[in-house]
Amino acid sequence: MTSPKETIADGKVVFLHYVLTDTDGDVIDESTPDDPLAYIHGTGTLIPGMEEALVGRSVGEQFKVVIPPERGYGVRTTDGPKPVPRSAFPEGFEVIPGMQLDSEDDDGTEMAIWIVDVDDDVVYVDTDHPLAGVTLQFDVSILTVRDATREELAHGHVHGAGGAHH
Ligand code: ZN
């Protein structure tokens, strides 16, 4: 008798490889052979469309999934990046394109902003995720599925190889 295969559900630790492309097939992001993506299912780590596509999958499964912006990084809500003077950032603070920062809007509500581009005097920032409005195509292969430990569940991340280093 073999035990039933572990399938992905809330509270499972999952290791997977993925290739993310846009609808033209251009690669946006991918995991590397020695650095698979590791996460705890049901903790909101991944975009909603990805967690939905992974439920019930088991080790060895390979599949493609197309995720619309609404189930991915959201629809676009701005007209694009806005220029901010470089001097608005603390001196010595290295501003790098792609960086995500916590900011506050005029009412003091916390929100994420992304650095899109950096000139000598001007930094272009956007409150939309860089992949907002993008239809995402994932190629996924499942490497490992196991129960999360109590410690991992408390921390909300995976420990050990491929997991968080802290
Ligand atoms: Zn931890």
Image (cartoon, helix red, strand yellow):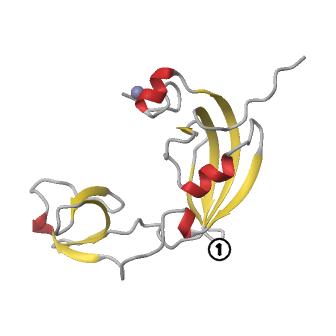
Where is residue 95 drawn, in percent x and y?
Answer: 23, 59
* Figure quadrant of the C terminus: top left
Residue shown at 76% from the left, 47% from the top = 62
Where is residue 31 drawn, in percent x and y?
Answer: 57, 47
Mark 1: secondary structure: loop
Where is residue 32 drawn, in percent x and y?
Answer: 58, 44
- Seen as rendered, the residue at the extreme top is 1
Residue shown at 50% from the left, 73% from the top = 133
- Seen as rendered, the residue at the extreme right is 1
Q: Which residue is mark 1?
A: 24
Where is residue 37 drawn, in percent x and y?
Answer: 56, 41
Ligand 1 picture quarter: top left
Residue shown at 54% from the left, 71% from the top = 134
The verdict on label 1 being within 8 Å of ligand 1 is no
* Figure quadrant of the N terminus: top right
Can you tell which quarter of the image residue 19 is in? Answer: bottom right
Residue shown at 50% from the left, 24% from the top = 160
- Foreground: 84 or 129? 129
Q: Crowding near pointer 1: few (<14 within 10 Å), some, many (20+)?
A: few
Disc tally is 1
- Foreground: 144 or 75? 75
Amino acid, disc 1 = Asp
The answer to whether 21 appears left or right of 131 in the picture is: right
The answer to whether 128 appears left or right of 145 in the picture is: left
Can you tell which quarter of the image residue 107 is in? Answer: bottom left
* 121 lies above or below 144: below
The answer to whether 137 appears left or right of 151 in the picture is: right
